[in-house]
Image (cartoon, helix red, strand yellow):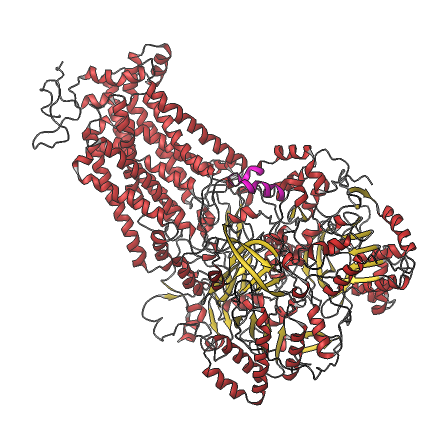
């Protein structure tokens, strides 16, 4: 047992030749286990959790109430119109799918690249992914005119002898999203099995023991188990990695494959993926900054984690900014007058307010991350990442609504206005997402204990000198 | 009678059960949740009166389906039969064919054999079928005394009124107020009535009247004469505030003749049209040269024209010289018109509108005579009933007589004078002095509620009658269905009063009274020749009954005028106000007709509302913003209505539309006693007897309150960026050239857009050997934008209306729309319009993106919509570059499911049984009238022959008075459509995105006066199409060689 020595080093300082520790506070294995398992096993639910959970649950209730109302009445209760046949639901869908990128990216890609700093945040990020994809999945389903026959988009044997139309990007979407969700869920769950077993072993209550016991799939911690676990985990990581790139690529095909000026552009796949990582990391920061403070996980989710994520945000934000510029260049360079107008119209037309909101939030605000003090300040990170989230929502708004509102024939141009139902559904989706996330925080291990232990400074070495 | 329909909207809406059911049964009520008001209107439209649960015992109580033991010889169940009939519109006949399915009329067409229809109809005639099934029609005889209302029967009425007639002796206290009619039978019944009651008085009133035409001819010739214009023989037409192509009673023929001469390859050359008018009419919008002038300035325009014509008849060169020097655009146009007139003696037409005073009409007659047009392009015939006083005078003398208590019993036959009477003729007040006012009319409207008796008048499609079209052809009206509400026609009602049973015709020949009366009148035309009668009834009219030309000479005292152009501009308080008929309701008579209410006005694109139209400069001067409320004052009266800033309105002139603000129209048009708000604003308070057409002295006060218009185009004030782009695009979308440019560069339309080679990812799945490849052309040189196609399509394809709030959200469902663009100067723009339906792209963007394959291609090239496969992702609509797909955001046809009994079930009867009624959540769009294609294919197959060209006609094509739409089989090289598509003028809209549309447009050709012509084509170099390796906009179907077109081009 190493003695717990307070690490005097600031983990965000790069000292040549010395790796900063990934976990601070000089905790040992038991302390890590204690720190993480204490949260789900605590019999008394903290008041603060209730304060966050109750409003979230109410808002989630509003979400489903608004959706039920819409299903009973007709999608006309939303503001969709001609020519803006897709509006907020699709904006929300792409926004949430984008959010759902960071988790798997952190888990799978960073895992394969041996970026061990990921271990402290990957669990929460993966949970966020699952919940974001669940939230996202609601939208394409509810926005259709006849939700009661939505299952026709799946290729299943039926008496009509009909396949879905495999040419349609919406059909590809169905496969891409459902595959991504399935694999992400498995990956998340598989990674959680050893930790669930820990909870099972430490649980006091009967129900807890039963539930965690069931979920931990009879994990024994034997070398064979670990061996298979590591293999399966690596395989799933390998499967997930292309999916991270493919999901948003396919989502972008919804737009890129159409012929609408402003949608029909080949830059969309990389631009969407970069945007999704950008938005996803911003959401992770937004969730973890308050969570690490509230649940006392500052030693596991260190400032260095925040800083690393902020660096990624700065990089992907710059890619996104470059894409915005490149879209304009291509619109001009293509000589296509319709595309040219669409982009001028974005910046100076009736929706220019949305465009400049997007530019400010996505391109301007992350620039502060060039400064280290900003990168390493949880407060500033939270603010900037909130901006980024707003900006990424507006990016989808600009793409979907501004492009649709003025397409080829000026006679059908229109100006989209959302209704109260649209607003309720948008706000409600956050309630739904937060409700799920709060439940996760309360009942599941928020940090991957087993993995964090693997990256602890080795107890034999004097703590704090080096990482691993 | 065991009918227990609800008797009035009042009664219905007050019932607590009704309100309860309404809340329970209509989830759609909440459909427009965010807009508080809309909920009410939605109910009003769709649901309100449906809920008749609990009211038992109506004629549809039982439904028994059984085969007929013996079948009528010409009747096959399920096979529609066309009957020739007609209807009257403001005193003139409209010759129609009505399609009937198993005794249920569902669709109106024009009578192609009839010289005044030529197969086309107006938009109003199309919508009259909806009126037939309007649940709000007066459905029983009503008796009202001291505010108490009682249902009665015709027998009660007869018992009560006969003593009155008897007591009146020679009829001294009896008067009739009738709407205008040209029915010979009605005239006959009038004669018989006056023979029996010689002292009875007879008045006729129509609020939108052609009185000034009649009075003008009287003034010019000293005898009544009707003017007929032969536009087919005219090379030059000058229209002075005259809407020849829309509101004229002979507009269908004018449009057909005019459109034929808009063909740039016509053997006699193209017709040239000048228009001087205060606000855009269809005629003005289609003119080669249009000048906005205030209606009050038309006299000066005419005077200038007259003096120039006099001068030019001496030397046309002098006019040309002046023209070369002149720079002021208005004078320049008048000079050009004068030059054209004098150089086309005998082949020109000058026409003046009905709003202009009779003195000007007389001067126009003189001018036409001076130009040697009489007998050639301008033909005079007798004017039936020409000696009558003008309608306003007639109404005035009736009001005086009523005030003087000279009238004890007043029969009001048709019309709605309580609503349409001008403000200074207090008809409503005077009616109180009448002891027994009796009203025969279609609705329990503003007039009916003031009368002691309200008698249901049979609809034209329910009754026997006859009428004369503008050319005088006597046209028969035969019933398509028994009166739905026990109504009787005007002639039957008068016969009832006279006890006339038309014994001259044997009741074996004609069972019904109406038929006997009509046959009695017909004796004058066909005698007792039964075969001739049968043929006439089959054809719908008596051959050779047209009015014959008369020789008239203009009185020498008719002199050219001396008014000078360029008077002082009117200031606020002296503004001109022009009253025009509404394209939605005419004079208010169609206010309860949802189809018409939702058809966008041809120029403003407004639905469900009337507006005050101001020119941009007028609005700026008055500090009025577009789409804000203004107060309009005239002659001490004040109304508030929204301002609509319209380019091309004459400066200082305000246009308002009549026929809105009905207080008792019905569920659709408003019924104030039942708290159903009026639609639009009634402008009659500003209208007075001397100024029925236009008046001066109006004042505008901006009130500033913003209004969101329910327009189908330009939903918001366009920003300069958008406006500039619209200007740029409009030239690519609507390709246009002057006649001489076309002659030197016939395939210019194919060279407007340059684009890279068009490649497709997919191989065309279409079989090149398919015997039917359907296609369409729309000739933009001919289309006037009259909207008849919109209503025809709505009627044919069961398209529901969606209501004002939904139109405000751009959710209208019309399968065909007419895009309208302004070009150039804001004060005097050019207008172009373009009908747009599904283009049936061969390479359809919509089909590729549908995840469930709900929209797929047929072998014959139609882009089919499979409603019951559609899940409503709306992706197809997003990807449609033409935005012709329409989505059912709500269950817009839900009212049909819910209607179980009572009058509401009538709404279903208008449906075309061959077209699916769509449900909520599915996409819909134009099908090229696939049901008509199928039916023609079945017929051809049964007869073992091929479909002949012209056999399948889409609803829009059939109704088009301009013959602008041609549909047919592209696989048949000799079909009209195939030839037109191969012609020089054809082009594909947005062909550069490789959609390969099956509908092609024919480029619009203008025929300007050479001195006024503005180049429309960019100067065309020789080299532009060779080296750049780019293709031009050659949008031919696959496999067509480009070489000939290229060769022609260089």
What kind of secondary structure does the magenta stretch mostly adopt?
Answer: helix
**Residue occupying the point 35% across, 43% down:** A394
Residue B825 seen in the current view: yes
**Numbered marks: total:** 0
Q: Is residue B41 magenta?
A: yes
In the rendered view, tell whether residue B955 sits above or below residue A425.
below
Query: Residue A162, percent across and down?
Result: 50, 41
Please state if B113 lies on the left or on the right of A276 as rendered. right
Please state if B849 lies on the left or on the right of B357 as rendered. left
Please state which of residues B509 and A95 is positioned toward the viewer in this rendering. Answer: A95
Q: Is residue B258 magenta?
A: no
Query: Residue B436, percent across and down?
Result: 83, 51
In the rendered view, tell whether residue B225 sits above or below residue B703.
below
Quadrant showing the N terminus of chain A: top left
Please state if A376 lies on the left or on the right of B166 as rendered. left
Query: Residue A154, percent across and down?
Result: 45, 37
Residue A371 image-quadrant placement = top left
Residue B773 seen in the current view: no
Furthest residue to the left? Answer: A17
**Residue occupying the point 75% across, 56% down:** B414
Please state which of residues B903 and B624 is positioned toward the viewer in this rendering. Answer: B624
Quadrant showing the C terminus of chain A: top left
Bounds of the magenta segment: B28-44
Query: Residue A459, percent across and down?
Result: 12, 18
């Amino acid at each position: 047992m190493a003695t717990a020595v307070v690490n005097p080093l600031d983990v965000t300082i790069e000292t040549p030749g010395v790796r900063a520790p990934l976990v601070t506070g000089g905790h040992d294995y038991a302390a890590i286990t204690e720190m993480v398992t204490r949260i789900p096993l605590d019999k008394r639910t903290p008041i603060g959790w209730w304060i966050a959970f109750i409003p979230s649950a109410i808002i989630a209730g509003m979400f489903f109430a608004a959706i039920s109302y819409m299903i009973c009445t007709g999608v006309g209760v939303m503001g969709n119109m001609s020519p803006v046949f897709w509006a907020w639901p699709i904006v929300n869908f792409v926004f949430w799918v984008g959010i759902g990128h960071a988790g798997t990216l952190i888990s799978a890609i960073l895992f394969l690249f041996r970026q061990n700093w990921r271990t402290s945040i990957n669990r929460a990020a993966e949970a966020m992914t699952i919940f974001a994809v669940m939230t996202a999945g609601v939208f394409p389903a509810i926005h259709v005119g006849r939700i009661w026959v939505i299952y026709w988009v799946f290729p299943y044997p039926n008496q009509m002898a009909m396949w879905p139309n495999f040419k349609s990007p919406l059909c590809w979407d169905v496969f891409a999203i459902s595959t991504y969700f399935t694999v992400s869920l498995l990956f998340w769950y598989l990674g959680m099995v050893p930790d669930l077993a820990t909870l099972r072993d430490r649980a006091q209550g009967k129900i807890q023991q039963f539930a965690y016991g069931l979920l931990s799939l009879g994990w024994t911690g034997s070398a064979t188990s670990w061996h298979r676990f590591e293999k399966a985990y690596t395989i799933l990581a390998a499967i997930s990695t292309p999916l991270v790139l493919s999901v948003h690529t396919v989502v972008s095909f919804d737009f890129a494959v159409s012929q609408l000026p402003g949608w029909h552009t080949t830059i969309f796949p990389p631009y969407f993926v970069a945007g999704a990582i950008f938005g996803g990391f911003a959401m992770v920061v937004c969730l973890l900054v308050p969570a690490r403070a509230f649940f006392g996980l500052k030693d596991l989710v260190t400032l260095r984690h925040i800083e690393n994520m902020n660096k990624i945000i700065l990089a992907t934000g710059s890619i996104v900014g470059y894409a915005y510029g490149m879209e304009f260049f291509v619109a001009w360079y293509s000589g296509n007058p319709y595309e040219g107008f669409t982009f001028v119209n974005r910046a100076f037309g009736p929706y220019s307010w949305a465009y400049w909101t997007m530019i400010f939030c996505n391109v301007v605000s992350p620039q502060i991350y060039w400064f280290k003090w900003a990168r390493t300040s949880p407060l500033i990170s939270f603010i900037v990442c909130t901006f980024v989230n707003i900006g990424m929502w507006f990016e989808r708004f600009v793409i979907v609504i501004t492009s649709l509102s003025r397409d080829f024939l000026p006679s059908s141009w229109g100006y989209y206005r959302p209704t109260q139902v649209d607003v309720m559904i948008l706000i409600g989706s956050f309630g739904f997402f937060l409700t799920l996330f709060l439940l996760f925080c309360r009942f599941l291990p928020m940090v991957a204990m087993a993995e964090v232990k693997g990256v602890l400074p080795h107890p034999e070495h004097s703590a704090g000198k080096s990482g691993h | 009678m065991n009918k227990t329909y609800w008797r009035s909207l009042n009664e219905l809406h007050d019932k607590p059960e009704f309100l309860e059911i309404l809340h329970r049964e209509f989830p759609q009520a909440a459909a427009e949740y965010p807009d508080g008001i809309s909920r009410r209107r939605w109910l009003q439209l769709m649901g309100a009166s449906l809920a008749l649960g609990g009211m038992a015992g109506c004629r549809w109580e039982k439904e028994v389906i059984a085969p007929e033991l013996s079948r009528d010889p010409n009747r096959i169940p399920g096979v529609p039969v066309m009957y020739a009939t007609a209807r009257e519109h403001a005193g003139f006949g409209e010759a129609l064919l009505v399609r009937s399915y198993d005794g249920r009329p569902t669709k109106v067409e024009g009578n192609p054999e009839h010289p005044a229809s030529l197969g086309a109809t107006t938009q109003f005639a199309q919508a009259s079928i909806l009126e037939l099934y309007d649940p709000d029609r007066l459905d029983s005889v009503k008796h009202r005394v001291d505010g108490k209302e009682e249902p009665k029967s015709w027998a009660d009425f007869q018992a009560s009124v006969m003593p009155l007639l008897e007591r009146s002796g020679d009829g001294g206290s009896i008067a009739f107020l009738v709407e205008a009619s040209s029915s010979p039978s009605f005239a006959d019944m009038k004669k018989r009535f006056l023979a029996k009651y010689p002292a009875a008085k007879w008045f006729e009133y129509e609020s939108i009247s052609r009185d000034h035409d009649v009075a003008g001819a009287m003034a010019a010739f000293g005898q009544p004469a009707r003017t007929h214009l032969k536009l087919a023989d005219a090379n030059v037409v000058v229209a002075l505030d005259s809407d020849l192509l829309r509101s004229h009673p002979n507009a269908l023929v004018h449009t057909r003749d005019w459109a034929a001469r808009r063909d740039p390859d016509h053997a006699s050359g193209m017709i040239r049209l000048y228009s001087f008018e205060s606000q855009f009419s269809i005629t003005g919008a289609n003119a080669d040269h249009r000048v906005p002038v205030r209606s009050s300035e038309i006299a000066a325009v005419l005077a200038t024209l007259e003096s120039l014509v006099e001068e030019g008849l001496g030397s046309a060169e002098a006019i040309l010289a002046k023209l070369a020097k002149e720079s002021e655009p208005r004078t320049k146009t008048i000079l050009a018109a004068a030059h054209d007139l004098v150089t086309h003696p005998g082949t020109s037409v000058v026409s003046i509108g009905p709003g202009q005073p009779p003195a000007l009409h007389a001067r126009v007659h003189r001018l036409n005579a001076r130009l040697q047009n009489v007998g050639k392009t301008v033909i005079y015939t007798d004017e039936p009933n020409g000696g009558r006083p003008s309608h306003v005078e007639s109404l005035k003398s009736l009001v005086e007589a009523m005030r003087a208590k000279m009238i004890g019993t007043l029969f009001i036959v048709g019309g709605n004078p309580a609503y349409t009477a001008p403000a200074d003729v207090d008809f409503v007040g005077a009616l109180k002095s009448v002891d027994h006012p009796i009203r025969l009319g279609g609705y329990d409207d503003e007039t009916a509620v003031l009368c002691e008796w309200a008698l249901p008048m049979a609809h034209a499609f329910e009754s026997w009658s006859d009428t004369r079209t503008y050319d005088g052809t006597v046209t028969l009206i035969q019933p398509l269905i028994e009166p739905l509400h026990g109504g009787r026609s005007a002639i039957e009602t008068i016969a009832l009063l006279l006890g006339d049973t038309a014994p001259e015709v044997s009741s074996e020949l004609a069972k019904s009274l109406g038929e006997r009366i009509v046959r009695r009148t017909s004796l004058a035309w066909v005698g007792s020749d039964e075969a001739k009668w049968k043929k006439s009834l089959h054809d719908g009219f008596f051959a050779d009954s047209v009015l014959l030309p008369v020789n008239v000479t203009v009185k020498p005292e008719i002199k050219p005028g001396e008014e000078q152009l360029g008077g002082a501009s009117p200031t606020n308080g002296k503004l001109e106000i022009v009253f025009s008929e509404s394209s939605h309701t005419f004079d208010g008579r169609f206010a309860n007709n949802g189809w018409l209410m939702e058809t966008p006005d041809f120029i403003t694109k407004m639905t469900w509302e009337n507006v005050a139209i101001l020119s941009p400069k007028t609005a700026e001067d008055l500090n009025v913003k577009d789409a804000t409320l203004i107060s309009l004052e005239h002659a001490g009266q004040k109304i508030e209505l929204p301002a609509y800033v319209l380019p091309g309105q004459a400066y200082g002139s305000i246009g308002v539309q009549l026929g809105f603000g009905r207080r008792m129209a019905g569920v659709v048009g408003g019924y104030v006693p039942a708290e159903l708000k009026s639609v639009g604003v009634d402008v009659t308070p500003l209208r007075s007897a001397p100024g029925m057409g236009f008046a001066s002295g109006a004042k505008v006060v901006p009130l500033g309150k913003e209004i969101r218009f329910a327009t189908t185009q330009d939903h918001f004030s366009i920003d300069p960026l958008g406006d500039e782009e619209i200007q740029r695009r409009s030239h690519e979308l609507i390709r246009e050239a002057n006649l001489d440019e076309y002659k030197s560069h016939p395939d210019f339309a194919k060279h407007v857009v340059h684009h890279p080679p068009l490649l497709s990812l997919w191989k065309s799945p279409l079989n090149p050997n398919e015997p039917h490849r359907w296609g369409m052309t729309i000739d933009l040189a001919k289309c006037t934008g009259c909207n008849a196609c919109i209503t025809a399509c709505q009627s044919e394809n069961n398209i529901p209306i969606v209501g004002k709030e939904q139109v405000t959200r751009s959710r209208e469902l019309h399968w065909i729309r007419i895009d309208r663009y302004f070009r150039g100067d804001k004060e005097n723009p050019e207008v172009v319009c373009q009908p747009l339906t599904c283009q049936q792209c061969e390479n359809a963007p919509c089909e590729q993106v549908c995840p469930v394959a709900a929209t797929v291609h047929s072998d014959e090239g139609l882009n089919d919509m499979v409603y019951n496969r559609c899940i409503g992702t709306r992706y197809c609509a997003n990807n449609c570059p033409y935005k012709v797909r329409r989505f059912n955001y709500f269950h817009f046809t839900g009212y049909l499911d819910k209607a179980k009994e009572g009058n509401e079930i009538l709404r279903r009867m208008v449906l075309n049984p061959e077209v699916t009624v769509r449900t909520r959540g599915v996409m819909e769009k134009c099908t090229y009238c696939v049901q008509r294609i199928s039916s023609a294919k079945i017929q051809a197959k049964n007869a073992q022959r091929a479909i002949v060209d012209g056999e399948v006609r889409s609803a829009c094509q059939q109704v088009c008075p301009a013959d602008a739409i041609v549909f047919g089989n592209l696989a048949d090289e000799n079909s009209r459509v195939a030839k037109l598509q191969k012609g020089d003028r054809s082009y594909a809209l947005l062909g550069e995105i490789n959609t390969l549309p099956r509908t092609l447009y024919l480029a619009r050709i203008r025929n300007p006066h050479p001195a006024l012509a503005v180049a429309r084509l960019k100067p065309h170099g020789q080299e532009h199409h060779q080296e750049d390796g780019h293709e031009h906009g050659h949008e031919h179907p696959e496999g067509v060689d480009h070489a000939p077109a290229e060769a022609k081009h260089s």
